[in-house]
Amino acid sequence: MKEIPLPLIKVNQAAMVLFVLLSLVFRQPLFIYAIFLIQLIALAAGARANLLFLVAKWFLGADRLQRSDTQAAELARFNQSIAVILLGISSAAYLLGWHIVAIAASVMVAAAATAAVLGYCIGCTIYYQYKKWKLLRSRAS
């Protein structure tokens, strides 16, 4: 199973929080568009294409990342998928002038990412329940 160093995951989560906060403070959807594109490219092309990971690797150093705890790439991808969907909804809503929907979707991303940085992964809970449901469903068949 492929693993991603936890410091890279934390940088990614912190960046999402930062970009959402910047968009709210400056009332500027460009921050949402930017983080959406960064996350979408990383989701489509893989962790190696994550701009935030590339910058973080340069600052953190390979030695520190090798010694750190990790998260399963499958789980990270699941969480990133949820973030991309919500950031995509937020981006589309901004373009349509639906500011309340846009803000709500981006705040959900920021809230989940903040919780994850602090130690509770909402996406992980959803992922676990999904896998559990899938297993129970396959056993019932």
Image (cartoon, grey):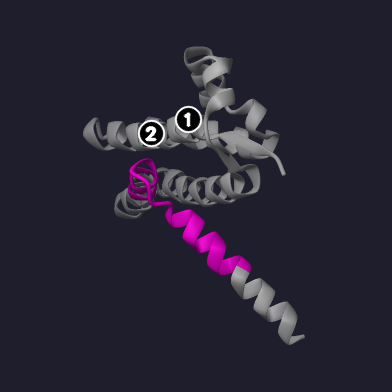
Which residue position is annotated with label 2? 14
What's under tag 2, amino acid-wise? Ala
Where in the figure is residue 82, as x and y percent of width and height?
52, 52
Mark 1 crowdedness (10 Å alpha carbons): few <14, some 14-19, many ≥20: many
Q: Which residue lies most toward the right here? A: 141
N-term-proximal mark, 2 vs 1: 1
Q: Which mark is residue 49?
A: none
Q: Secondary structure at mark 1?
A: helix
Q: Residue at x 48, y 55 (%)?
A: 123
Q: Nearer the viewer, mark 2 or mark 1?
A: 1
User: Is residue 26 shown to the viewer in this render?
Assistant: yes
Residue 34 in picture, x, y percent from top left: 46, 30
Label 2, label 1: how far apart the Cα atoms are: 10 Å
**Residue identified by numbered label 1:** 7
Q: Amino acid at mark 1?
A: Pro
| Residue 16 among those drawn in magenta | no
Q: Is residue 51 visible?
A: no
Q: Is residue 79 above or below residue 56?
A: below
Q: Residue at x 73, y 81 (%)?
A: 139
Label 2 Cα crowd, 10 Å radius (few <14 / some 14-19 / many 20+): some
The main secondary structure of the magenta stretch is helix
Looking at this view, name the residue that lies furthest to the front: 67
- Quadrant location of the N terminus in the rendered image: top right
Q: What residue is drawn where x is 70% and y is 40%?
A: 2
Question: What range is drawn magenta here?
Answer: 111-131
Query: Considering the image in quadrants, where does the C terminus appear?
Result: bottom right
Where is residue 129? Give x, y as percent. 54, 68
Closer-to-camera residue (13/108): 13
**Does residue 24 appear left or right of residue 40 in this picture?**
left
Residue 110 image offset from top left, x and y in percent: 35, 44
The secondary structure type at the circle numbered 2 is helix
